[in-house]
């Protein structure tokens, strides 16, 4: 959701509820009514809930997601990730092959980073260089 939607995240999920266990797990790690991407993924890894379940619960609880591990949102005044100066041919090929409807899914970006032994933000920089949009977010933020 955009900044203009702040405070109405639940509007994306009409008539849905949050499992009590998931609500408790989220509340246990909240900081200033924010849930970081890393915390959300850790909750998913430590439970039977998927990252999208955690993201949906955060929305329903009107909690703002922060600290995208790809560097796309929630870093305060941190500068936007700059495009990579050059793009490895093999990496560029994999990025292009991984596109779905012209965009690179967040999950694919994470996997490519792992496969190439790169930081997740390096994939974002490569996508910036290649004019590739990253979406959808595993948490449902974008």
Image (cartoon, grey):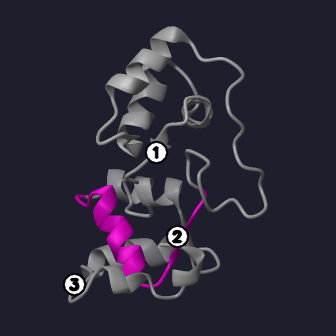
Q: Residues within 10 Å of mark 2 (few under 14, many from 20)?
A: some
The C terminus sits in image quarter: bottom left
Element class at badge 1: strand
- Could you say where residue 12 lies in the image, as x and y percent from the top left? 33, 79
Considering only order in the chain, which callout, 1 or 2, is on the residue closer to the N terminus?
2
Q: Give the answer, above or below, for where 18 lies relative to 53.
A: below
Where residue 56 appears, as percent x and y from the top left, is 33, 72
In the figure, 54 relative to 128: above or below?
A: below
User: Count the marks: how many?
Assistant: 3
Q: Which residue is mark 1?
A: 134
Taking depth in this image into account, of 20 and 59 the one nearest to the observer is 59
C-alpha separation, residue under disc 3 versus residue under disc 2 = 22 Å
Q: Nearer the viewer, residue 34 or 6?
A: 6
Q: Earlier in the sequence, mark 3 or mark 2?
A: 3
Asked whether the beta carbons under mark 3 and mark 2 sit within 8 Å of each other, the answer is no
Residue at image position (67%, 17%) is: 86
Q: Nearer the viewer, mark 2 or mark 1?
A: 1
Find out whether residue 65 is within the magenta segment. Answer: yes
Part of the protein shown in magenta: 48-67
Q: Which mark is residue 16?
A: 3
**Residue highlighted by disc 2:** 29
What's the CA distance linking mark 2 and mark 1? 27 Å
Q: Residue at x 24, y 79 (%)?
A: 19
Residue 126: % across, % down: 58, 28
Q: CA distance from mark 3 to mark 1?
A: 27 Å
Cβ–Cβ under 8 Å for marks 2 and 1: no
The spot of residue 97 in percent (x, y) is 33, 23
Circle 3 or circle 2, nearest the eye: 3
């Amino acid at each position: 959701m955009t900044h203009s939607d702040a405070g109405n995240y639940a509007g994306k999920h009409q008539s849905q509820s949050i499992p009590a266990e998931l609500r408790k797990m989220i509340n246990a790690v909240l900081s200033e009514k924010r849930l970081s991407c890393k915390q959300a993924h850790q909750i998913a890894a430590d439970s039977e809930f998927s990252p999208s379940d955690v993201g949906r619960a955060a929305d329903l609880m009107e909690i703002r997601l922060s600290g995208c591990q790809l560097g796309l949102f929630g870093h305060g005044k941190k500068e936007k990730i700059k495009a990579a100066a050059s793009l490895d041919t093999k990496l560029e090929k994999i990025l292009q092959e991984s596109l779905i409807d012209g965009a690179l899914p967040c999950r694919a970006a994470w996997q490519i980073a792992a496969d190439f032994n790169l930081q997740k933000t390096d994939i974002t920089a490569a996508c910036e260089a290649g004019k590739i949009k990253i979406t959808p977010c595993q948490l449902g933020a974008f």
